[in-house]
Amino acid sequence: MQQQNEPMTHYGYDLVVAELKNLKEVERPNIVKEISVAREHGDLKENAEYHAAKEKQQFIEARINELGDLLSRIRVLDPSTLKHDKIGFGSTFEILDLDTDKKTCYTIVGSVESDPKRGLISFHSPLAKAFIGKEEGDEVSVKLPSGEVDYEVVRVFFREIAFGENDAH
């Protein structure tokens, strides 16, 4: 099975690199020390600290592997250099719910950067997939948990996203 490329902004790439560096250089050495200290407490069969530390070590190693795989598939894109005449990666788009007349704005970003509460949706999300390739004036029916909703694409444009220090997941 071919690995799927993961589109991402420079910001998302930097987040992945920073998390991986922290896990390898800080978390991994710390957990090795925790395991060593817990091992000194004697009988490993009934040593809850030891088992908790080993479990944490497994989580850290799994996350390191996951991030390494992700890094091998990342395709860093600069949305400001892409066309936004149709909805695609990095596009911000305003849609109108044809039943409620409510307007909503979304921006399509990489999975690491997604934050639906801020209107940042993953390139791989069902909502993004429903709108990719659409342009202003297009009508789209989207199946949501609450039922099918009809939208009209009001506007497609590029907007620089302000990512802050508190955005790290």
Image: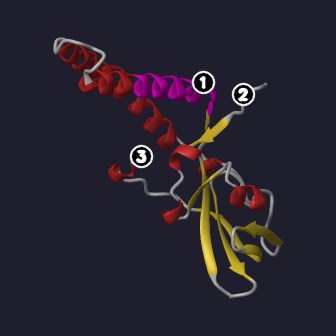
Q: Residues within 10 Å of mark 2 (few under 14, many from 20)?
A: few
Three-letter amino acid code at disc 3? His
Q: Quadrant of the N terminus?
A: top right
- Residue 3: mark: 2
Disc with the residue nearer the chain's start (3 vs 2): 2
Q: Is residue 86 visible?
A: no
Mark 3 → mark 1, Cα distance in angstroms: 20 Å
**Residue for badge 1:** 72
Residue sitting nearer the eye, 5 or 46: 46
Magenta region, main secondary structure: helix
Disc with the residue nearer the chain's start (3 vs 1): 1
Is residue 52 shown left or right of residue 157?
Answer: left
Residue sitting nearer the eye, 99 or 113: 99
**Residue for badge 3:** 169
Mark 2 → mark 1, Cα distance in angstroms: 9 Å
Please provide percent x and percent y for residue 43: 23, 12
Identify the image quadrant of residue 54. top left
Q: Which residues are magenta?
A: 58-74
Is residue 115 shown left or right of residue 153?
Answer: left
Three-letter amino acid code at disc 2? Gln
Q: Residues within 10 Å of mark 3 (few under 14, many from 20)?
A: few
Q: Residues within 10 Å of mark 1 (few under 14, many from 20)?
A: few
Is residue 102 shown left or right of residue 162?
Answer: right
Please provide percent x and percent y for residue 123: 66, 50
Identified at 60% across, 71% down, the residue is 105
Disc with the residue nearer the chain's start (2 vs 1): 2
Q: Are marks 3 and 2 in contact (CB under 8 Å)?
A: no
Please provide percent x and percent y for residue 49: 24, 25
